[in-house]
Image (cartoon, rainbow, N blue to C red):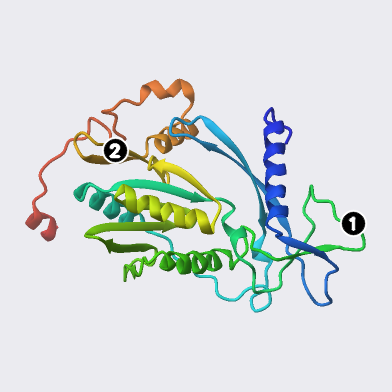
Amino acid sequence: MKSADSAQWQEAIDAELQSMHTNDVWTPQILPTGRKLVTTKWVFRPKHDIHGKIIKYKARLVARGFEQIYGKDFDETYSPVTRLSSLRLLFALSMQFNLELQQMDVETTFLNFKLTEEVYIKIPQSVQIDNPYNCLKLNRALYGLKQSPRAWYEDIYRNLFRVETSNVCKNENCLFFKHTNHNLIIIALYVDDLIIAGTTTDVNEVKQFLNSRYVMKDLGHVHHILGCEVVCDDTNNTLFLTQRRYILSTVKRFLHTSELHKVGLNASPMEASIPLRIDDTNESTEN
């Protein structure tokens, strides 16, 4: 908040708190006897486009879930996500069957369902609560809570079945598919990111259904997922995955700017003068 972008970060904080108020995330209360408070912290993260330019300042109020007590504050926590290999398969099938690839993102993901457990948090910084209340009882989940990912998955899992996507890959619980009028539609879920593959009509129907259940952000054609850039070539019916931005950020992190020109395409960490010879397996075994 002391940076040159403090005004943008303050706007992000105000937007997050307004979302909390709109979704009725908490209720001021006096902490019951014998209960422990879970503290929170603000997490700030800029979002970039595929060229690395900042397009959004995101402030998230996160619960420090490691302070939760098993059996009191949470129970089951496991939640599956789509594997990268499954996404690669999805992209390959989309190219093979000429399916349209669209992406959607769920806004304030964990605020979409109610908590079944009683969880009390310390009043966060920037939140003003009148006396005599000394804590907040959570009505909905926050990022950082142990049970939040599992509860979210169960909620969207039920809703995806209501869109008649009645088939789930046996080895991939976040890959949904169905056949409609001889057409194939596939939905891949990675927490709050959804990749939808199908005909334009089928994809639009799924989008309309999701918009009726959640506050969604339509990202259009897939361009970026799980740190990978997705480049589609409709002319040649090909799709490429690249981590160009990740590679450049890694180079920038570990190499000084003045050293960047020294790294060429043919550069190798191996010493160039080392003599190499063909290994004789029998000789190596005897030795």
Residue under label 2, please give it. 232
Q: Residue at left 42%, top 35%?
A: 245
Q: Relative to 32, is 262 on the left or the right?
A: left
Q: Position of residue 202 (x, y in %)?
A: 33, 54
| Quadrant occupied by the N terminus | top right
Element assignment for label 1: loop
Q: Relative to 193, is 184 on the left or the right?
A: left
Q: Where 134 sits versus 278, above or below?
A: below
- Is disc 2 in contact with disc 1, using a CB cutoff of under 8 Å? no
**91 and 75: which one is in front?**
91
Q: Relative to 35, is 152 on the left or the right?
A: left
Q: Position of residue 162 (x, y in %)?
A: 43, 67
Q: CA separation, marks 2 and 1? A: 54 Å
Q: Residue at left 59%, top 68%?
A: 147
Residue under label 1, please give it. 130
Element assignment for label 2: strand
Q: Position of residue 223 (x, y in %)?
A: 38, 39
Q: Residue at left 80%, top 51%?
A: 127
Q: Specify the quadrant of the image occupied by residue 165.
A: bottom left
Residue type at the position of mark 1: Asp
Residue type at the position of mark 2: Cys
